[in-house]
Amino acid sequence: MPSLEFRQFTCLRDGHPLFNPLNFSLHSGEVVQIAGPNGAGKTTFLRSLCGLFDEWTGEMLWQGQSLRVPDFSMCSELLYLGHQPGVKKSLTAQENLHWFFGVQGVSFPGSVSSALAHVGLEGYEETPCHQMSAGQLRRVALARLYITKATIWILDEPFTAIDRFGVQNLETLIQRHASNGGLVILTTHQPLALPNVRMVELARPTEVALDG
Amino acid sequence: MVETPSLRRAIWQSLRRELLLSYRHKGDLANPLIFFLMVVVFTPLGISEEPAMLARIAPGMLWVIALLATLLSLDGLFRSDFDDGSLEQMVLSPQPLACLVLTKVFAHWLLTGVPLTLLAPVLGVMLQLPADGYGVLVMTLLIGTGSLSLIGAIGAALTVGLRKGGLLLSLIIMPFYVPVLIFGSGAVKNAIGGFPVNAELAILCAMLLGWSVLAPFAIAGALKISVRA
């Protein structure tokens, strides 16, 4: 059961806090939406909890243990989908998916075809990704969610370039993952049609030096 | 329950992907080889077609051009992975990044160093390389290009976040390329002159071993800095 806790957590940019320090804990079964205007530090926050950004202060506790960078046990449970989804355009959808799991060192669970069918890409297994549209590329990356056994999903704007039907599917998937004991942390500017979404608002730091 | 990840699988999958990618981009594969071929063809035209003269400069020429051809291929080593987010996925993998990058460098050597080594004797004929030099030329290039790939990858990892990292990359790694070049071409000259080459070969092997132990950690560290910047 994953659990994450943040104490006085804030990211720094040029030594200044990006948002007011956060104090909250996350448990399995939760869907958390990180909210805030553009430039509030949503992506930076997600990246720092993956260990992809290290200028932050405060404490991050994974299973009650304070971490600076995700350790082996946290990395094994983590799935991060960023702005750049990590899909190689000269490889096929199938090859990309195999690598995603291969680089983690886990065997490929389930079948590629069924995962691609879930994201509406049936019959595209052997298609090189450079022949796909932006939305389809995004869907190749999202297909990972149907296969992965990772429990913590960190999704940065997962709905970008996805059509309305795809968004519905993805919401259902997120809901199911949470009810199976997973933890989903995401950012989006779209209103979520999910019950029980916990909002964490990133507010501008109060003590900004206005004359600085 | 999440299964225990296996390092061997991660390494195999990374290697497979590198080979697949280079198969899809055959042009990138041919680039250093064409450069190597071009310079060697132009050398007799530009300098002198006199066999004795060519034979004297051949060992050094072949080594310098092979080194520059390797350098040419390095800039893109991590660039596309950085741009499309694959590098983040590598950093996030529970597997040690040093092992993953060592796989990547191995693939680079396999696709650059080995073809250059195989092409070198053919080009040696064009430069009138004396017969005693061929065996040692192939041996030194095979060992030396391994070091060149490892050292170059450190520079490529440090400069991957910069838009115009090419020049900086060359400046960073040039000093580390010097000993490889000196001992590599020195061994070929010794072989031609009839002197023993064991010492040079031993030093080249030692450099390769040293770099293969140290470089993966330096590359992994540099990549983490680049990703987190």
Image: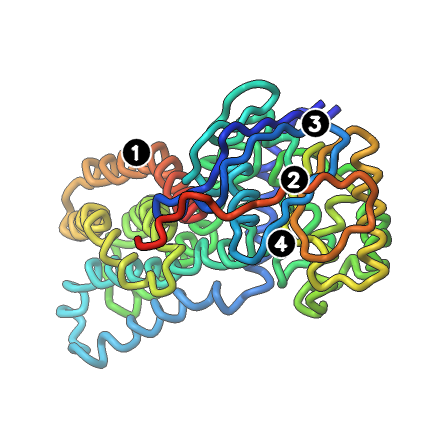
- Please state which amino acid type lies under the numbered disc 3: His
Q: Which mark is residue A27?
A: 3
Q: Position of residue B79 (x, y in %)?
A: 45, 58
3D distance between C-alphas at marks 3 and 4: 26 Å
Q: Position of residue A132 (x, y in %)?
A: 72, 68
Q: Which mark is residue A85?
A: 4
Camera-side residue of A56 and A160: A56
Q: Chain ID for label 3?
A: A
- Please state which amino acid type lies under the numbered disc 1: Gly
For label 2, the residue is: A79
Q: Quadrant of residue B203?
A: top left
- Label 1: few (<14), some (14–19) or many (≥20) C-alpha neighbours in 10 Å: few
Q: Chain ID for label 2?
A: A
Residue at 77%, 51% (x, y): give it.
A192
Residue at 24%, 67% (x, y): give it.
B128
For label 1, the residue is: B210
Residue at 19%, 80% (x, y): give it.
B46
Horizontally, is B48 left or right of A147 in the view? left
Report whether mark 3 lies on the same chain as mark 4: yes
Q: In this view, does A159 lie above or below A45?
A: below
Q: Which SS class for mark 3?
A: strand
Camera-side residue of A87 and B227: B227
Camera-side residue of A195 and B64: A195
